[in-house]
Amino acid sequence: MAEVITVVGGGIIGLTTAFELTERGQRVRVYDPTPGERGTGASYFAGGMLAPIAEVQFQQDALFPLMVSSANAYPSLMRRLAAVTDAPTGYDTTGTLVVAGDRADAAHLRDVSEYYRSINRSAEAIPVSRARALEPALAPDLAGAALIEGDHQVAPRLFLQALVKALRARGVEFVRERVTDSDFGDIVCTGLGAAGQYPLRPVYGDILRLQAPHPLVEHVVRGFVNGRPVYVIPRPGGEVCIGATSREDTRTRPGVDGVYQLLKDAIRVVPAVEECELIESNVGVRPGTPDDLPIFGDRTTATGRRQLISNGYFRHGILLAALAGKAGAEVFLGGDIPPEFAPCSPKRFEH
Amino acid sequence: MAEVITVVGGGIIGLTTAFELTERGQRVRVYDPTPGERGTGASYFAGGMLAPIAEVQFQQDALFPLMVSSANAYPSLMRRLAAVTDAPTGYDTTGTLVVAGDRADAAHLRDVSEYYRSINRSAEAIPVSRARALEPALAPDLAGAALIEGDHQVAPRLFLQALVKALRARGVEFVRERVTDSDFGDIVCTGLGAAGQYPLRPVYGDILRLQAPHPLVEHVVRGFVNGRPVYVIPRPGGEVCIGATSREDTRTRPGVDGVYQLLKDAIRVVPAVEECELIESNVGVRPGTPDDLPIFGDRTTATGRRQLISNGYFRHGILLAALAGKAGAEVFLGGDIPPEFAPCSPKRFEH
């Protein structure tokens, strides 16, 4: 009988990795005190944008291929997941509308669109009137708009639950324990849990969950408002998520400044946000690395065992999970490191 | 052996009434599914200002004597409560600072101060520089300030807990049941629970609880900002409450518009509010009456029993609790209706 592969970490990366292992006929055990649930990790509080285009930033040339590969891997993952469970994931390919609050924001939107074109990705500049025809709830006095049909989304909490259900259906055993021994486990997806071995830092993101009296928007709306990004993310049942700030202070609960700015900017872009109820204000903590790239590859533990590290996905854990899961399973089973992951070796932080 | 007096409702009015009954040697039983705890009532989410002066509004001439009487009754209540339990109540007599955001707000502040003087109450107009000497965290560009030394506060959750402890120490029995039979009980303090018999309507108030990195202010700060009131209320342990909106819509969770305005206006008055963490966003529901006055007095139930109604304290439940408790006990035991409660008879709504 085949040995059991142990995955440490039941956030989005650990779960997709475990799923891909089961797809390849492996027996898997997942260690996490709260697999797929509200815990200390980022997955439960993520925005869920599968947005390689809207999310790419200047001078993140090494990150962009990872994002694109993972976005391309999503349709297959979703099809295969749906073959195991009919639990909803909130997977939605409607696309992303990017809008600009003022003329400076519009200039920034044009710069970003130029950059997209330079890397062969398109963000179609559209008149604000067309954006408002697509989404009547948008503010009438926006300064610019672009439609990115390739940027999609999932609802992270649903997606996590669906993965857990699929894994249970496949006979995966969940051990509800926190593993702190760095020598333990075959595949380690513990995020900040690995901060003792790698230079991971906590990066907090404030996120709000609202209940709208009626669905506000169908697309994910990403606004640039006075130079700040804000996301208005429609979810099933008339829920709306608003995120996400990014801060590196020590406040482990939502920052008043962040909550205030999110509300202000979201209302600027979609005024009817004011009519919603505030269900919760939360904060997720992302594992940031010095170069903003994940940590992916083999290491040798203190006792000489082989271990695969798949960690440090920072603000892009949900987007990168499809690729991370596939690559994690393949590499652990003897495959080559995919070229997109070449800059992500754990060795870059081992001295 | 004396009969047990049954009080229905374990919010602030029911608890102070029960306490005053025990002070008079009575045996008491309180019916409430969540006495003194988070429940459906307003007490747990109240701001806790004992502010007859800052809170009085024009043309509330019948309400003002109730507020003043109850504020005057607080020191005695607090002394007698402290004789039974050493549980903290957050009772704080530092006073209230009222500040104005812009010149129109300052003009309003002057009008209100005039009104206070016309009813023989004082709000001392002070220079903004002196207000900032008292509270260095105030914004430097305020347009006006007044000091109201007679307006105090309690911390409602602590106060409720202290009352429950005192009542338990006095042998009061708590029955954790929701009473819906309008015929049941000697003294009925159920707030909106009595909406079937009296014209009580739900009036929601959004309230935020923050954790400050260090205490922000010592006084309760009441701001007028663009014509809107906002309270920044210091609490023990560096907590700060921000409230309170007043709305009569159907949203039973915090309104995004209310939360946004509270943050905006609080930051306008005390900029360092931005540095806080948001612990919770909540909503309390107050029992409003058509004339904004409580419903206080005897009624005869369907089965011909005498019942004392003490309900409908609207936005002023915490402030009015000292008077309501004292008057409730005295009237039930055969005393006269105090003159302040003369306009509050239940008969005005019985046809």
Image (tube, coloured by chain):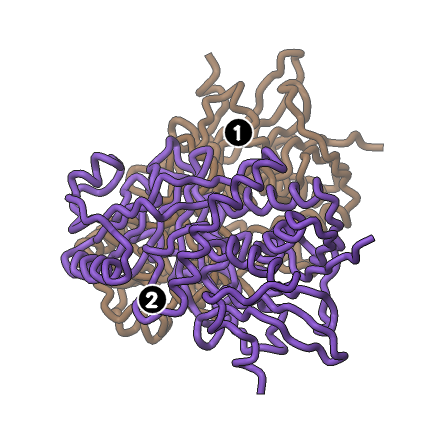
Chain colours: A brown, B purple
Instruction: Say what secondary structure mark 2 lies in.
Output: helix
Q: Amino acid at mark 2?
A: Pro
Residue A273 in which image quadrant: bottom left
Residue at which label 2 appears: A271
Classify the position of the C terminus of chain B by image quarter: bottom right
Q: Amino acid at mark 1?
A: Leu
Residue B65 versus residue B79 in the image, above or below? below
Nearer to me, A55 or B274: B274
Residue at which label 1 appears: A192
Residue A319 appears in the picture as rendered? no
Nearer to me, A103 or A262: A262
Instruction: Say what secondary structure mark 1 lies in.
Output: helix
Q: Are marks 1 and 2 in contact (CB under 8 Å)?
A: no
Residue B7 versus residue A245 in the image, above or below? below
How far apart, in angstroms, are the residues tagged by discs 1 and 2?
37 Å
Residue shown at 72%/51% (left/top)? A165
Residue B125 appears in the picture as rendered? yes
x, y percentage for residue B190?
62, 64
Q: Chain of mark 1?
A: A
x, y percentage for residue B179?
72, 66
Q: Is residue B338 left or right of residue B115?
A: right
Q: Residues within 10 Å of mark 1 (few under 14, many from 20)?
A: many
Question: Quick one: label 1 or label 2, which is nearer the N terminus?
Answer: 1
Residue shown at 57%/54% (left/top)? B12
Q: Is residue A246 left or right of residue B89?
A: left
